[in-house]
Image (spheres, rainbow, N blue to C red):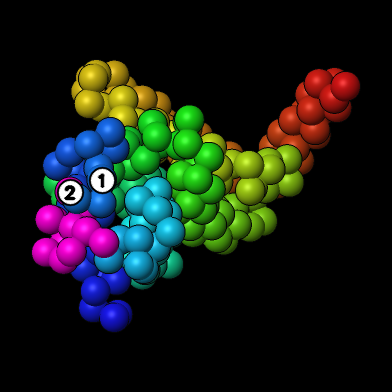
Amino acid sequence: MADTKQRLLDGALTALREHGVTGVSARTIGAAAGVNQALVFYHYKSVDELLGAACLAATRERVTLYADRFAAVGSLRELLQVGLDLHASELSEGNVSVLAQMLAAAQTGERLAEPTAAALQLWTDEIEMVLRRLLSGSPVAEVADIPGLARAVSAAFVGLELFEGVDREGARQALAALDQLAVLVEVVDELGPIARRALRAKVKSHLKVREP
């Protein structure tokens, strides 16, 4: 039974890559998995439930695969490089197209929205842990919403993965801008104590002005 469920999970991803979300069905999944299509409904309540489970399982596997890379990150620029390497790997394996299909379907399919969001959260959680470690003791950490920043980074990479398909040069420029921001944070961290205090006070002052 465990082998059959794994074949269905793999088959769902294959069908999604080959046919797109509008062409995925119990029949196409069964064909890709090499099993009777009725097993889709035996093990899962619907095709959508299987797609959600497949997306979540595949993401969990990828996050685990990159866990050591994330743990070894020593700077924001290194985090960006891990993101670039991850993007190249996901693109070559067809996982970017899977993500694009799931995100598109989740806009109108509530049953796919929850597992897709949960899959993205796995990456966000990993990024948040890295950011908390890297920004510990930094003036940035005192004014930044780390969980929100982690979501922004995660969303930026998701957007860039999809954006690159229609504007490769625009995506390259966006990545270069992220690298510049990472350099800026590193420069801030290298400031002397007086400059750091002045910067901290200035940022806090601006944040108070913007509060409703």
Label placed on residue 202: none
Helix, strand or loop for disc 2: helix
- Queried whether the magenta region covers residue 20, the answer comes back as no
Mark 2 closeness class: few <14, some 14–19, many ≥20 residues within 10 Å: some
User: Residue 16 in the image: x percent, y percent?
Assistant: 23, 44
The image quadrant of residue 11 is bottom left
The rendered magenta stretch, by its main secondary structure, is classed as helix
The image quadrant of residue 44 is bottom left
Could you tell me which residue is drawn at 23 percent across and 78 percent down? 3
Could you tell me which residue is drawn at 12 percent across and 55 percent down? 31
Asked whether 95 or 137 is in front, the reply is: 95
Q: Quadrant of the N terminus?
A: bottom left
**Distance CA(mark 1)–CA(mark 2):** 5 Å
Residue 137 appears in the picture as rendered: yes
Left or right of 17 in this view: 122: right
Asked whether 142 or 109 is in front, the reply is: 109
> Which residue is under mark 1?
25
Residue 120 appears in the picture as rendered: no
Q: Which residues are magenta?
A: 28-38
Q: Quadrant of the C terminus?
A: top right
Label placed on residue 28: 2
Q: Eyeballing the image, is 106 above or below 41?
A: above
Mark 1 closeness class: few <14, some 14–19, many ≥20 residues within 10 Å: some
User: Residue 101 in the image: x percent, y percent?
Assistant: 31, 36
User: Residue 204 in the image: x percent, y percent?
Assistant: 80, 33
Could you tell me which residue is drawn at 18 percent across and 64 percent down? 36
Q: Eyeballing the image, is 83 above or below 126?
A: above
- Queried whether the magenta region covers residue 36, the answer comes back as yes
Tags 1 and 2 touching, CB below 8 Å: yes
Q: Amino acid at mark 2?
A: Thr
Left or right of 61 in this view: 10: left
Left or right of 194 in this view: 15: left
